[in-house]
Image: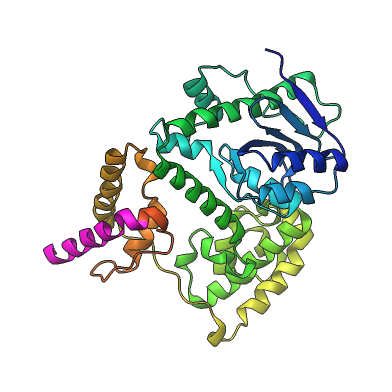
């Protein structure tokens, strides 16, 4: 089948098409980008379809993204994507905007119990009974001209995405459709809640093992790493490798030889930033006790795993009742946060990460389960 492909290669053409797309109930959107050795993704191509044509937008030739940003933010037009976390980063970097009314077909498939975290090819095979050609995933999307194979791959992808949306939406109840959009809004909100560099240390491996004085050093190291990754547009591990952070904060080397001996320390980091890091560590180690971070909570003990299993079972039962993939119901991180709020003897508090319909449907059952455990202990 010949695909009707329309190229958009200038600002005026983009503005004209975006004006037309505002009148549609939905647009399917996909992106192709490169992110081999950069912190931020570099857009190579944007694809849009209303279900009949594939519009290919060349981001290397366009510099006015205001019309596309307005389309993304128009709540009357549903934006359809698949497994979209990296696409969202592309939109934010390119247009400064994120989609309002976001429908992720990967989430929709889980709500219909077709499978959890389904890859795009498998979803197209399941829903449309079409086998996609092995992708151009390792292609250079910044090369020009793009190959015929790249062009047809990109156009097919977005056309099928529109078809998949139409079929999934017909099968979703109004309630489940609202939940897919609610989860889409949550994905957008999470990206908007970018962690401040000063708080990055909380996510560092083994940070809970450090004293408050050592955490003061880790906080500065992680904040510097985060800022430098963004400023240099390099992956975090190119600045300092993840596994070097904890031993740096714990042993606090005071010379280049000791720094070079740190676990997983890259020689280039020592050469390029060694002297600066030694000074940063020295200054952070002099932080007065009143300004030390609070100690971080330890991971849950092994004994808590049985309780975690009981909580997860609540989600699984509810998933079976609603015919939703059980993995979509209660995230492990949310259940761990709930347990940490009062383990081992309570009282427990529902974490902020348990929101919306999940909180409404399962919040009380989770608290009742924990209260019952407390009584039987």
State which quadrant residue 200 falls in.
bottom right
Instruction: Work out which quarter of the rendered image holds the C terminus and state it.
Output: bottom left
Front residue of this view, candidates 348 and 286: 348
Q: How many marks?
A: 0
State which quadrant residue 271 falls in.
bottom right
| Coloration mode | rainbow
Q: Position of residue 32 (x, y in %)?
A: 71, 35
Q: Position of residue 82 (x, y in %)?
A: 57, 36
Residue lying at the far left in this picture: please name it.
Answer: 376
Residue lying at the far front in this picture: please name it.
Answer: 23
Q: Which residues are magenta?
A: 359-377
Q: Position of residue 34 (x, y in %)?
A: 73, 39
Residue drawn at 21 percent across, 61 percent down: 368
Whether residue 39 can be seen here: no
Front residue of this view, candidates 8 and 21: 21
The kind of secondary structure the magenta stretch mainly shows is helix
The answer to whether residue 320 is above or below residue 74 is above
Residue drawn at 53 percent across, 30 percent down: 166
- Queried whether the magenta region covers residue 65, the answer comes back as no
Instruction: Work out which quarter of the rendered image holds the N terminus and state it.
Output: top right
Whether residue 125 can be seen here: yes
The answer to whether residue 220 is above or below residue 42 is below
State which quadrant residue 219 falls in.
bottom right
Residue lying at the far top in this picture: please name it.
Answer: 1
Residue drawn at 65 percent across, 43 percent down: 87
Whether residue 309 sits left or right of residue 195 in the image: it is left
The answer to whether residue 49 is above or below residue 178 is above
Front residue of this view, candidates 78 and 373: 78
Q: Position of residue 202 (x, y in %)?
A: 52, 65
């Amino acid at each position: 089948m010949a695909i009707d492909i329309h190229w958009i290669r200038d600002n005026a053409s983009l503005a004209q098409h975006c004006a037309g797309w505002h009148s549609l109930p939905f647009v399917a959107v996909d992106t192709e980008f490169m992110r081999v050795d950069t912190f931020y993704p570099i857009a190579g191509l944007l694809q849009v379809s209303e279900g009949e044509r594939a519009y290919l937008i060349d981001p290397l030739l366009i510099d006015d993204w205001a019309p596309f940003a307005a389309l993304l933010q128009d709540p009357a037009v549903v934006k359809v994507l698949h497994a979209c976390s990296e696409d969202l980063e592309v939109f934010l970097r390119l247009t400064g905007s994120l989609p309002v009314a976001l429908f992720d077909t990967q989430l929709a498939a889980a709500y219909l119990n077709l499978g959890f975290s389904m890859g795009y090819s498998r979803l197209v095979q399941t829903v449309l009974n079409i086998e996609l050609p092995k992708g151009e995933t390792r292609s250079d999307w910044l090369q020009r001209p793009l190959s015929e194979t790249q062009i047809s791959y990109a156009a097919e992808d977005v056309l099928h995405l529109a078809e998949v949306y139409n079929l999934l939406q017909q099968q979703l109840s109004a309630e489940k459709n609202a939940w897919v959009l609610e989860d889409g809004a949550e994905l957008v909100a999470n990206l908007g809640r970018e962690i401040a560099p000063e708080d990055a240390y909380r996510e560092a491996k083994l940070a809970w093992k450090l004293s408050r004085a050592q955490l003061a050093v880790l906080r500065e190291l992680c904040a510097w790493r985060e800022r430098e990754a963004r400023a240099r547009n390099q992956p975090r591990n190119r600045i300092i490798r993840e596994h070097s952070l904890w031993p740096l904060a714990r042993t606090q080397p005071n010379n280049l030889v000791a720094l070079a001996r740190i676990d997983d320390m890259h020689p280039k980091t020592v050469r390029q930033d060694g002297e600066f890091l030694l000074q940063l560590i020295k200054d952070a180690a002099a932080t007065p006790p009143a300004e030390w971070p609070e100690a971080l909570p330890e991971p849950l003990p092994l004994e808590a795993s049985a309780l975690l299993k009981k909580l997860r079972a609540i989600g699984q039962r509810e998933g079976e009742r609603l015919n939703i993939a059980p993995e979509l119901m209660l995230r492990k991180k949310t259940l761990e946060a709930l347990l940490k709020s009062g383990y081992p003897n309570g009282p427990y508090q529902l974490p902020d990460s348990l929101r919306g319909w999940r909180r409404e449907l399962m919040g009380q059952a989770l608290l009742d389960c924990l209260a019952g455990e407390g009584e039987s202990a």
